[in-house]
Each structure stands twice: as structure tokens, then as C-alpha cells.
Amino acid sequence: MKYICLLLILFTVSAKAQVLFDEEYKDCNTNKPCYYCGDSVAHYKKRIDERLQYTIDHGLHKWMSTSGHMYFEFEVDSTGHSCVKSIKDETHMSDMKNNLRICINGLYDWQPAILNGHPINSTLIIDLRFLGNRATVGFVKPDAF
């Protein structure tokens, strides 16, 4: 019985370690994060900041004079499709967060990470910073947390 309890505790700890933030989603294909990996890192073929800014500005839910960060941990698979794995929302704008998650999940214009000449799955983190009436978009590495 002791061993079963120990195994359950280890499984719980290892399962939690699969995502970076507490608000977790099960939409993605893989469980193993490979942050910013490959010989070349995954990148959006167009301007990700413009795409997310458009979603923020033209979505159904508006924001005004809010400060804080929203972090989106997401996977870009080997086909160039993105999928949000977890979110940390310091702004508490749940409607805006859900719109941005839908937007990120709908992006197919990614160049996947390349390792040894082959596309691979990789994980990236977007930091959306809200300050007053402005929003900025940037990428951060997991060691920033």
C-alpha cells in the first residue's frame, strides 16, 4: 500500500511538471515540453504581434486601463500548427484570455522548429503585457519564471 501511495504521488508531481502554468489545457498532442528547441526555433511566418493586437483590438471583449501580463505556453507542432498548453493570467480578463487562446490555437502560419533537417514539435511562451491602454507582445523563456 505504501508503494502505491508513493507511485501516485510521483505520478501527480510528474504530470504537473508537463506544463509551466497552473491553468492547463488538454488540446495539444504531446506532453513533453521542448522549449525553444531545434537547430532553428519555431517562428510565425507573419507578424505575431499584429495578429494578436488585432484580436485584442477587434474582439468582442474590450479592455481599458489594465495592467499586468498574460503568459501563453503553447506548442508548435511539426506541421506548423499552434496549440495553447497552459496560461498564466495576471490581468484577470478571462474573456480576453479565452479570445487570445482561440486565436493562438487557430494559427497555422508557423515555421516549425527544425532539428537535423526535420521539423519537430517545440514549445514557446508568449508574454502579452498590458499597460494602461497599450499591449505589447514578446517571447520569453521558461527560466524567466
Image (cartoon, rainbow, N blue to C red):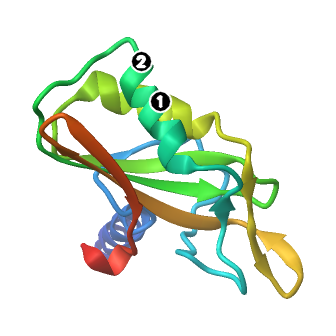
Q: Amino acid at mark 2?
A: Gly
The number of numbered discs placed on residues in the rendered structure image is 2
Location of residue 132 in the rendering, given as x and y in whole percent from the top left corner: 12, 38
- Relative to residue 63, is residue 80 depicted above or below? below
Location of residue 72 in the rendering, given as x and y in whole percent from the top left corner: 40, 51
- Relative to residue 62, is residue 129 depicted above or below? below
Taking the image as shown, residue 72 lies to the left or right of residue 41, namely left
Q: Amino acid at mark 1?
A: Tyr
Location of residue 24 in the rendering, given as x and y in whole percent from the top left corner: 39, 46
Residue for badge 2? 59
Taking the image as shown, residue 133 lies to the left or right of residue 143, namely left
Which mark identifies residue 54? 1
Q: Locate the N terminus by quadrant.
A: bottom left
* Residue at screen point 47% across, 30% down: 54
Image quadrant in which you'd find residue 5: bottom left
Taking the image as shown, residue 111 lies to the left or right of residue 96, namely right
SS of the residue at dot 1? helix
Q: Nearer the viewer, mark 1 or mark 2?
A: 1
- Mark 1 surroundings within 10 Å by alpha-carbon count, few (fewer than 14), some (14 through 19), many (20 or more): few
SS of the residue at dot 2? loop
Image quadrant in which you'd find residue 89: top left
**Dot 1 or dot 2, earlier in sequence:** 1
Taking the image as shown, residue 144 lies to the left or right of residue 8, namely left
- Relative to residue 77, is residue 9 depicted above or below? below
